[in-house]
């Protein structure tokens, strides 16, 4: 019995580059093994697809191939599964052919000969999305075999899945209460509802509005709404590590109303950024934004005019000033 089981596993390990016993995805069985993956994903994100298994009796070992479109998805890891409360180890996995995205082979093996019964999943496949918006990849199962603790093959029905890379809608809402729209050359960003009365500043303080950039954009203008014009301002953008990416430096505060301020053309890669504004007096006022997103606010820093090269948050602010970059 032990010899039979090891033949299944070792045979697969030695022959990772060749096909195993072929099977038909339509083959009937009381047990179903299927790909469980989110139907829609975003570009440049990670997700996990599970290799689910329905009720099985005395499961012991498995091997199977998973095929996907390498122009859309890349596998970064394969981790253990669980049936009932028992961990199902991934004994080995690898690319077919070696070091080439598009197809992997996975081998499960339960130590000893206990036989595991129940339902759950055989493995978790960790994917990174490399495809562009609108692309699709099937995730298929092939060349699969399951055996029980007597080295008897378990009949299986194999079911694949697919994922679709989301396209950006005109004004999708992102997680920090901001929204964006994709233009031809530039992308207006942080388009939020302006409401209430304009709010004043503590002189020389900076306010930082966190936003999420979901795809690469180029910005060359920053737009704010001024209630009362006074003194000088500095507006700019910081990265998630608090490093200043671009700013205007000290400039005269524009007249009341909407003001579009030119900045150096700057490429922002996907990630978290902070749009910043600082003022050298407490007479100027700026409109805040109306965000219904729990307790998320902007942040402030004292003695930060003009905007420093490195932001340092002094506290959470009760206002979110309206800022738009394009």
Image (cartoon, helix red, strand yellow):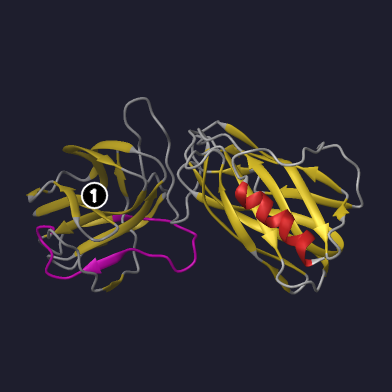
The image shows a total of numbered marks equal to 1
Going 12% across and 58% down the picture, which residue do you hit?
309
Q: Where, by quadrant of the figure, is residue 289 drawn?
A: bottom left
Q: Is residue 293 magenta?
A: yes
Quick one: 236 or 56, which is closer to the camera?
56
Q: Where, by quadrant of the figure, is residue 157 drawn?
A: top right
Instruction: Work out whether 315 lies above or below 142.
Output: below
Say which quadrant the C terminus sits in. top left
Query: x, y percentage for residue 9?
Result: 69, 56
Q: Secondary structure at mark 1?
A: strand
Query: x, y percentage for residue 60?
Result: 78, 64
Quick one: 30 or 273, which is closer to the camera?
30
Magenta highlight: main SS: loop
- Residue 175 visible in the snapshot: yes
Which stretch appears magenta? Answer: 287-307
Q: Is residue 272 magenta?
A: no
Quick one: 69 or 252, which is closer to the camera?
69
Q: Is residue 326 left or right of residue 11?
A: left
Going 60% across and 37% down the picture, which residue do you hit?
68
Which residue is labeled 1 in the image? Answer: 226
Q: Is residue 326 left or right of residue 296?
A: left
Sort mark 1 into few (<14), some (14-19) or many (20+) by Cα contacts within 10 Å: many
Query: x, y percentage for residue 87?
Result: 69, 70
Going 75% across and 74% down the picture, which residue do you hit?
85
């Amino acid at each position: 019995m032990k010899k039979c089981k090891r033949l299944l596993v070792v045979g697969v390990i030695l022959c990772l580059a060749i096909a195993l016993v072929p099977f038909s995805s339509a083959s009937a069985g009381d047990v179903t093994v299927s790909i469980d993956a989110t139907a829609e994903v975003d570009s440049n994100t990670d997700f996990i697809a599970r290799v689910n298994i329905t009720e099985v009796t005395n499961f012991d070992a498995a091997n199977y191939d998973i095929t996907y479109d390498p122009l859309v998805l890349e596998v970064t890891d394969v981790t253990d599964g669980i049936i009932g409360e028992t961990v199902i180890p991934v004994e080995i996995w690898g690319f077919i052919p070696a070091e080439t995205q598009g197809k992997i082979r996975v081998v499960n093996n339960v130590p000893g000969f206990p036989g595991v019964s129940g339902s759950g999943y055989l493995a978790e496949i960790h994917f990174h999305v490399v495809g562009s918006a609108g692309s699709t990849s099937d995730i298929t199962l092939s060349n699969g075999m399951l055996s029980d603790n007597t080295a008897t093959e378990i009949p299986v029905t194999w079911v694949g899945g697919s994922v679709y890379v989301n396209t950006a809608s005109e004004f999708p809402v992102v997680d920090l209460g901001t929204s964006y729209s994709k233009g031809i050359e530039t992308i207006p960003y942080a388009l939020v509802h302006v409401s209430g009365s304009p709010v004043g500043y503590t002189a020389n303080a900076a306010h930082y509005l966190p936003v999420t950039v979901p795809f690469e954009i180029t910005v060359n203008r920053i737009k704010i709404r001024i209630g009362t014009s006074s003194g000088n301002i500095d507006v700019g953008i910081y990265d998630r590590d608090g490093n200043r990416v671009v700013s205007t430096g000290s400039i005269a505060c524009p007249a009341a109303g909407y003001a579009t301020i030119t900045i150096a053309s700057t490429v922002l890669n996907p990630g978290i950024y902070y749009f910043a504004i600082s003022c050298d007096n407490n007479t100027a006022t700026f409109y805040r934004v109306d965000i219904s997103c729990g307790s998320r606010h902007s942040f402030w820093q004292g003695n930060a005019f003009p905007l420093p090269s490195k932001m340092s948050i002094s506290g959470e602010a009760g206002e979110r000033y309206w800022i738009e970059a394009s």
